[in-house]
Image: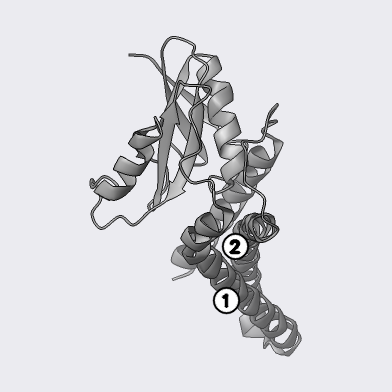
Amino acid sequence: MKYLWKLTPVHPRDLPGMEGWLEEMAAKGLYLDHCGTWSIFHRGEPRVMRFRIQPSRREFVLQEPPEELLELFADFGWQYERWITSSWALFSTQDPNAPEPNPDPQTLELSLQPFIRSSTRYFRFYLICTVFFLLLTVWVIPHMSPWAWQSGLHITLLVNHLFYLWAAWRAWEEFRVARVLRRCLESGNLLPPRPGPFPPWRSVFRLALDLLVLCGLLWNLWRTITAL
């Protein structure tokens, strides 16, 4: 079985974008095995398929979704594929006329509430941390002693600030996705898969920023060790 790695061009929790992208991949004969910044696909026969992502509880790493959820989707002609995040299950069907298993926007909004709350909480936390370290850096650097300048303390502060900026940006991405989903569902609209094309520029930028932050942290760690 041949595998193919692809940069995920949408946020993994962007339901319409992720479902639309997986449908585009299935039409090319590519089927998801792992979802992340890099998604892994195995090759097969090209098929016209429909995908739906459903939030669900997951008590153990290898556990399938609850039996009642599997039965609900099976009754509408959908089958379980795999987990794509720690709490989001992927379902598929090859029937173009299969009814939606969860057509009520309010029901879907309720199932998305844990994600919406956690994304809001994490964004606020990292935003506060970013502002705090920014103010700390602005206040500390002008008052540092010559020894502190020579030891590179200002570089450590700047690298830490870069890390929190990165964390706040990643939290903002997830918060933005959650806000769009919530507004759409509150207006009474469903979330049909978003059609492509799906240019990977956002994922390329995200990956480049991840590498930049990682290099900064490793360089700062190396500089600290060699200074001992």
Query: Where does the image place residue 142, in percent across and percent down from the top left?
Result: 76, 86
Residue bearing mark 2: 171
Locate residue 207, reporting x and y percent: 60, 43
Say whether residue 182 is left or right of residue 80: right
Instruction: Please give the name of the residue rendered at 58% of the width and 54% of the height, measured from the top-left corner.
Output: 105
Q: Which residue is mark 1?
A: 125
Task: Identify the residue at image location x=70%, y=78%.
Answer: 134
Frontmost residue, 72 versus 202: 72
Q: Which image quarter holds the N terminus?
A: top left
Q: Dot 1, crowdedness within 10 Å: few (<14), some or many (≥20)?
A: some
C-alpha distance separating marks 1 and 2? 9 Å
Q: Between residue 23 and residue 97, name the one nearer to us.
A: 97
Secondary structure under tag 1 reads: helix
Which comes before the other along the chain, label 1 or label 2? 1
Viewer can see residue 128:
yes
Labelled pair 1, 2 in contact (Cβ < 8 Å):
yes
Q: What x and y, as percent, mark residue 205?
A: 68, 43
Q: Is residue 163 above or below residue 202?
A: below
- Which residue shows up at 51% across the image and 20% down it? 26
In which quadrant is the C terminus drawn? bottom left
Q: Amino acid at mark 1?
A: Phe
Residue 141 drawn above or below residue 74 = below
**Amino acid on which disc 2 is placed:** Ala
